[in-house]
Amino acid sequence: MKPASNAFFCYILECADGTYYTGWTTDPQRRLRQHNRGTGARYTRTHGPVRLVYVEPQPDRSSAMRRELQIKRMKRGGKEKLIQDAMLGSGDPSGMLREDPRPA
């Protein structure tokens, strides 16, 4: 699934050690692959592998960047509530939570 070129997303990754990483991108699946290859953020290089647990579409880049900061400022419980609400709502509203590099 290739997102439209003008699509922007805020996302949360769960790292192998259970911590969360928040970022924004135009293509969540590409960004997930980058993080797992070690070409993403420095944080995920040392805490990987990671899995995509939350994706939130945004209307434009500045909205995605603002939302990223809002989520980063949340305590862990707030992030967990976002993730849980998204999963309970319709399972995977964005259709982007498919790739999980960790063994079952």
Image (cartoon, rainbow, N blue to C red):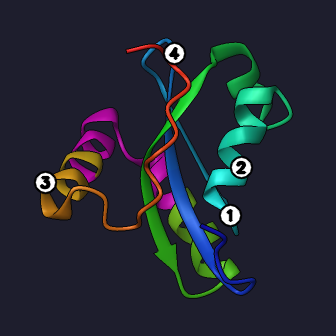
State which quadrant residue 45 falls in. Answer: top right
For the residues labelled 3 and 4, the Cα–Cα distance comes to: 23 Å
| Label disc, if present, on residue 88 of the rendered structure | 3
Residue placed farthest to the left in the image? 88
Span of residues in magenta: 70-82
State which quadrant residue 25 falls in. Answer: bottom right
Camera-side mark, 4 or 1: 1
Amino acid under disc 3? Leu
In the displayed structure image, the side of residue 5 where residue 94 appears, left or right: left
Q: Position of residue 34 (x, y in %)?
A: 78, 40
State which quadrant residue 85 falls in. Answer: bottom left
Amino acid under disc 4? Ala
Q: Position of residue 74 (x, y in %)?
A: 38, 46
Label 1 Cα neighbours within 10 Å, binned few <14 / some 14-19 / many ≥20: some
Label 1 with label 2: CB-CB less than 8 Å? yes
Q: Residue at x 67, y 80 (%)?
A: 62
Instruction: Give the residue at mark 2.
Output: 31
Tell which circle, 3 or 2, labels the residue nearer the N-terminal end.
2
Q: Residue at x 40, y 67 (%)?
A: 94
For the residues labelled 4 and 1, the Cα–Cα distance comes to: 22 Å
The image quadrant where one finds the C terminus is top left
Label 3 Cα neighbours within 10 Å, binned few <14 / some 14-19 / many ≥20: few
Residue 72: in magenta span: yes
- Secondary structure under the numbered disc 1 in the rendered image: loop
- Secondary structure under the numbered disc 3 in the rendered image: helix
Instruction: Give the residue at mark 1.
Output: 27
Tell which circle, 4 or 2, labels the residue nearer the N-terminal end.
4
Instruction: Give the residue at mark 4.
Output: 16
- Secondary structure under the numbered disc 2 in the rendered image: helix
Q: Nearer the viewer, residue 63 or 74?
A: 63
- Secondary structure under the numbered disc 4 in the rendered image: loop
Label 2 Cα neighbours within 10 Å, binned few <14 / some 14-19 / many ≥20: some
